[in-house]
Amino acid sequence: MTEAGSGAPGAGPSPHPATVLDDVVHQRVRLGILTVLSEATECRFAALRDELGLTDGNLNRHLRILEQAGLLQTTKGYEGRRPVTWLRLTRAGRAALRAEVTALEQLVSRIRTATAADEES
Amino acid sequence: MVQGSADEAAETLAALKQLRERAHRRAHGGAWLPALGFAVLLLASAALYRHPLAQPTSVDATHPFWAGLPDEQVSPLASYLFWFVGTPLLFAVVALWYAWRARRHGVRVAWPLVAATGLGVLVLLAVLAAVPVGPVPEELVFATGPHWAGLSTPLLPLAAAVIVLGRAEHSRGLLAAGIWIAALTVWLCTSFPLGHLPGWTSVLVGGSGLGGQLSLRPAHYLVLMALPLLVVAAVNLATGRRPR
């Protein structure tokens, strides 16, 4: 009998979902940033800050980390005379979010299956 | 301890789902206006036909089908102007709408891609079918199979724009509506007279295999095309106004 999610028979055991979690993405605020940005083509800095209830400085710190990892792009411009910053997820950012959510779902299902088996035995 | 990790991960997933739904409403809560605009344009085009609802004894149609569907037009020139002025006008109104939403809500939708697709296919159609109107080609009449010349219709650019809008708005409903309009257009415009049923469809229901014709008129088909767009617009408007 193979373990849940262990892949095709004969293949080696799949890595534990916890090992797939990416430190850059896994942080709660950064997961929130990626989630909000995944729904829009572009999102204004202020809109993202309000949506997540963060301060400018806090949001900036997380954005820098995500930008350095190549997960998002920023574009600066003007609306009238007001400077605005637009944020956009990169392809890698979308893939990283998908991978993180899948890993979390697998983790939950794996732990719950193991707990249920323990309770039965 | 381990159970605690599972609960924490489950909580994170639930919080992300909530956040995604809220962000979706914020980013795509304006899809109702373009959906409604496309539906209105489709329904308004019923005025381009000489007999939009009544069943005439004979139909004097010209090709290309500038009104959209293969039926008798009031004036091919009026049909041409309706689509080639009306469609860019609709895109202009929708562009203003998205610009206003971007300022108000701070989110942008990939709207320029929708306009580029719709207008691009429309311009391509104008180039390919720029020849003056003439009689319906013989191969389209009493069709034995689909004849693709009939696809020189302004309904296809509209369908293409709705499909791309569905992608930009992350809306399966709009995607389905665009595919539905395209499918109806391909069926209706590749044979003449309007509503021709190929032989195999009557075989499916136990008929003789000679085919037939549905007795619906252009306005009926346009309502069928517009219906999914109206449903999507109503649902989008209702969910967008739901208290958060």
Image (cartoon, grey):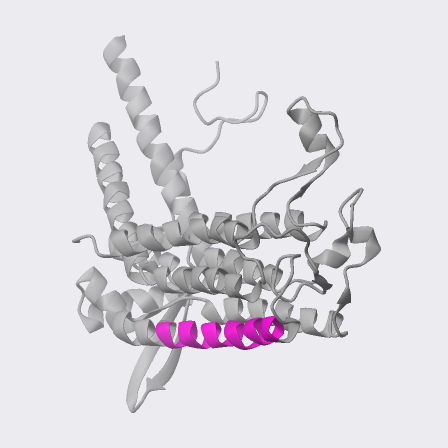
Compared with B118, A13 (above or below) is above
> Would residue A45 appear left or right of B117 to someone viewing this image?
left
User: Is B31 on the left or on the right of B139, as rendered?
Assistant: left
Q: In this view, which residue lies farthest toward the right?
A: B138
Residue A58 visible to an observer of this rendering = yes
Q: Taking A4 as reference, is B160 above or below it?
A: below
Is A110 located above or below residue B212 in the figure?
above
Residue at the extreme bottom of the image, as rendered: A81
**Magenta highlight on residue A86:** no
Magenta segment range? B78-97
In the figure, A10 relative to B62: above or below?
Answer: above
Tell me which secondary structure the magenta stretch mostly adopts: helix
Q: Quadrant of residue A38?
A: bottom left
Q: Residue at x 22, y 56 (%)?
A: B241
Residue B212 image offset from top left, x and y in percent: 69, 37
Instruction: Report the residue at 23% width, 13% height from top.
Output: A119
Q: Position of residue B71 (x, y in %)?
A: 65, 57
| Residue A59 visible in the displayed image | no
| Residue at left offset 67%, top offset 21% | B206
Residue A103 picture location, percent across and down: 39, 39
Name which residue lies at 60% across and 70% down.
Answer: B79
Q: Quadrant of residue B151?
A: bottom right
Between B147 and A110, the one nearer to me in the picture: B147
